[in-house]
Image: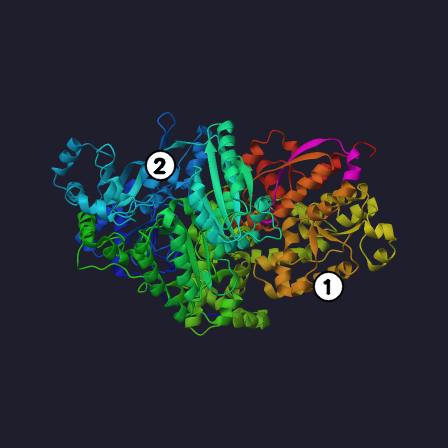
Amino acid sequence: MIPALNELSDVQSLYLEFIEALKSEGFRGDLCPDYASRTVLATDNSIYQVLPQAVVYPRDSSDLQCVARLADEPRFHGVVLSARGGGTGTNGQSLTDGLVVDLSRHMNGILEINVEERWARVQTGVVKDQLNRALKPHGLFFAPDLSTSNRATIGGMINTDASGQGSCLYGKTRDHVLELDTVLLGGHLWKSAPIDRATLEGICHGDSRVADVHREVDRIAREQAELIEAKFPKLNRCLTGYDLAHIYDDAGRFDLNSVLCGSEGTLGFIAEAKLNLVPIPKCAALVNVQYDQFQDALADATDLMRAGPTSIETVDSRVLQLAMEDIVWHKVSEYFPQGERAIRGINLVEFTADSEDKLDAALQNFCSLLDKASGQAGKSFAYSIARGHAEIGKIWAMRKRAVGLLGNASGEERPIPFVEDTAVPPENLADFIREFREVLDSAGMSYGMFGHVDAGVLHVRPAIDMKDPQQAEKIRPITEQVVELTRKYGGLLWGEHGKGVRSEFAPEFFGELYPELQKIKAAFDHRNQLNPGKIATPGENSQLLKIDEVTTRGELDRQIPVQVWEGYSEAVYCNGNGACFNWDPDDAMCPSYKGTRNRLNSPKGRASLVREWLRLLGERGVDPVQQSNLVREQSFITSLPGRIKNTLAKKRGEYDFSHEINESMQACLACKSCVGQCPIKVNVPEFRSQFLELYYGRYLRPMKDYLVGSLEFLLPALSRVPQLYNWPLRLPAVRWALARLGGLVDNPQLSRKSLQQLCNKAGMPVATPQAIASLGPLQRRRAVIIVQDAFTSYFEAELVLDVMRLLRKLDFVPFLAPFKPNGKPLHVHGFLAQFERAAIDNAAMLNLFAAENLPLVGIDPSMTLTYRSEYKKLMGNKAPPVQLLQEWLAENHQQLQEQAGRFGGGQFQMLPHCTERTNATASMADWKQVFSALGQELQIAELGCCGMAGTYGHEAANREDSERIYRQSWGPAVATATNRQNLVATGYSCRCQISRLEGEKVRHPLQALLAQLRDGA
């Protein structure tokens, strides 16, 4: 039995007093001093881990003012604050040991869009892609394009002065900031925009923090103009963090926003922004230029820029290889054909234009240059062209995943960010990178590279195992050598991703200008309360952070024993890239985060909690892998007194960190979208089941777990007399009791006639050794065995029969495998010993059929995919090879084409199961191939999760969140369908959710095909 984890790092009394004061002052947002919230926000996408005292989520600007006003009171001068947005920083920008002020949960509204004047006003918790989704119908977009655009907030972009792909044309974030509403210490809300001299002088005559700030910044701009001109490099990625070079704009106006943009929360809280918008290019094409060597791609970029493209991005062979193993590859593989000549470097060259004629002319000119140079040393050997925003978007999506993909490299040494956004003049880039590679090669490091060669920015991530102290010590010497290289080639260490912990190199770079930065910091925050240790200090009495003096994740991870680290590999490699914070409701990952906006309820959040849980257990000498074996061996009866005692203690309020983790795990839908879509392949359902097994080895389980876990074993008996199950469920008293005592709601009805009865009547055979042995050669070639699952067989028996009917009419010979529990519900709820027994028993039967070389096919995607994930982890290659329906049918498309004449034409829209869409992505194309072979048109909707996910939506505690998730994506898709009769859904739980919330029945795709058979066919 694992121990209670109740001796943790307590919140300092000053911060508890501050939180209580916020309550008294009417703060309306969320106040979270709990250890789980602190743990999850202790990391970002950097190598660092800093435990904050608490997290606050302001609801609006008034809440921000409340925070800043209280922090300015003498009693709270010791409180330090750090603003946080998407949490995707690579240099610890938002990490703090004080109070995190997270603007992403509530302050995420798009306030106004002015199409005629091309601007938008937003709260700074708005995500970039969220804004561009709203702007798209107007033909406009917010230009800076980040790889993290689906989760990066506008506030985070402003605070790091973010740029990204296309910056040579569109510039950086500050180039599109028109106005900022910033809350300063003391609570003053200041609106800043470019102002003329008279207005500036009027402000400077005041006696306030605002006046002090304007006077100081103006003085520096005027008195240090020559030094600023000499110090600031003339780069596309000009210096971020108190940008003195742009205090006065081209029109001679004073612009405080040049200082606020890139300030990383060290000067104030940016609450709202008015942003410039630009037209979406009408026409676009992307030329994918391929090279023998990555260095050739870098060197050639300078020549390619002469053709005037919109942007040039580069990718090395390591990133490309990882992309080939990723969910994204099937969408882009046609543009990167794998022949005898290996692709070791790629330049992605984009052209945009207002007309197809202009685009064609630019492409013709560019491609003629490529053709002339082809075959020359150091030049490309091939290229492909993608046209249109949709196709180009697929390739950019692959490029955007490069950061995360590098983190999925095998082994313990993984590419990490610490010198990964250097910028040099583009003409120097090839030589700079050559020397950069020499530094890494001499240190014996592997690495991955990608970036914006047109802007002279390349992202280089050396592979280091930060758990190894000797490897971690390489951070400083490598960084210092890279700093020297950037100086040599006229560049910057911080070209794109902000300074953060790397601010320690600012004094050396700025030289005599650094004291001026300190004066700006002092004018805004002379006590150093706002994100201290970054960009600049307000004086000599405080110090900047140092890259090797801030706690790293590796330092804490090395406290987890090796065997435990390996036993929980699905959790521990999360690098904080934040892909699971994807804003898009039509993207499957992560429904529990989208439904709650709570970062604890995300794969990154849950992985962080489990890593800390493992570390705390390790501190106490507890091995959870060993404890799991003990739990499986212990008797239910003999362990009951201890579990009752611990549960009573829990009800009395006795603290255990495991309770906070359990709360997060209970919110998980176990949809497995994280497994398919996380570039690191974090597998929450797997480590969730491991945690639940141990948690309920200490505490009593709720009744619902036993009901759900036993369902597959009870259904065969219940189905014999379905009325005894169905009739009580119609009674209000029974439904009330099930909800209150059993924790289950909206329970589905068993099929009125059992599958066995239906099959007997229809003459559908059951798979037995004798039946298989009696098959002739032709029948054997066309035989297929339908593997039952509990949900379709007992709640949708007609569907299973319809599938077999259709297969028979298509001239196949379908057999129904005898029913055995699949075990997935057991696994989901952490009954791992029971799951193992059920899986071994089921696999033994199915493998007998597989040994006959007969295809095994499942109907429900979620249950079927269990065979290639949970079963495979348990038994390796002995897992039965069960295919999805569409995979097997696509393999037999020629036989389908022969039957196409028997079908009437039809148009259908498919609503795919999220597990199927993310874990068997290629099978989406199989569905299209199947429908096309039978003369049907099929569109596949891009949707998130339906919110049901097996029994998740039937649990009373999840009912509200389940519907909220449905209304975000599936609800609008169903409501706007032009013909609901032509909607089809592949998942049982999805069809069940639509029936529950819409009162309509949606068919399975094969039922729709069956209905298309002409009479008499």
**Front disc: 2 or 1:** 2
Vertical comparison of 416 with 628: above or below? above
Give the quadrant of the C terminus: top right
Question: How far is disc 2 from disc 1 in space, using C-alphas?
Answer: 58 Å
Please tell me whether residue 903 belongs to the stretch shown in magenta: yes
- Is 7 positioned to the left or the right of 566 in the image? left
Q: Which mark is residue 844?
A: 1
Please tell me whether residue 838 belongs to the stretch shown in magenta: no
Query: What is the secondary structure assignment of the residue under circle 1?
Result: helix
Q: Which is nearer the N-term, disc 2 or disc 1?
A: 2
Residue 554, horizontal then vertical, whole percent: 40, 65
Residue 868 seen: yes
Q: Please report the bounds of the magenta region as a residue range.
A: 897-918
- Is 106 positioned to the left or the right of 346 in the image? left
Q: Which mark is residue 438?
A: none
Q: Nearer the viewer, residue 777 or 598?
A: 777
Disc 2 and disc 1 in contact, CB within 8 angstroms: no
Residue 602 seen: no
Question: Residue beneath label 2, please?
Answer: 122
Inspect the image, locate mark 2, and give the three-letter code of the amino acid beneath it.
Val
Name the image colouring: rainbow
In this view, the residue farthest toward the bottom is: 621
Residue 495, horizontal then vertical, whole percent: 34, 50
Query: What is the secondary structure assignment of the residue under circle 2?
Result: strand
Q: Nearer the viewer, residue 434 or 541?
A: 434
Crowding near the residue tagged with mark 1, few <14, some 14–19, many ≥20 C-alpha atoms within 10 Å:
some
- Please name the residue shown 52% across and 31% down the image: 360
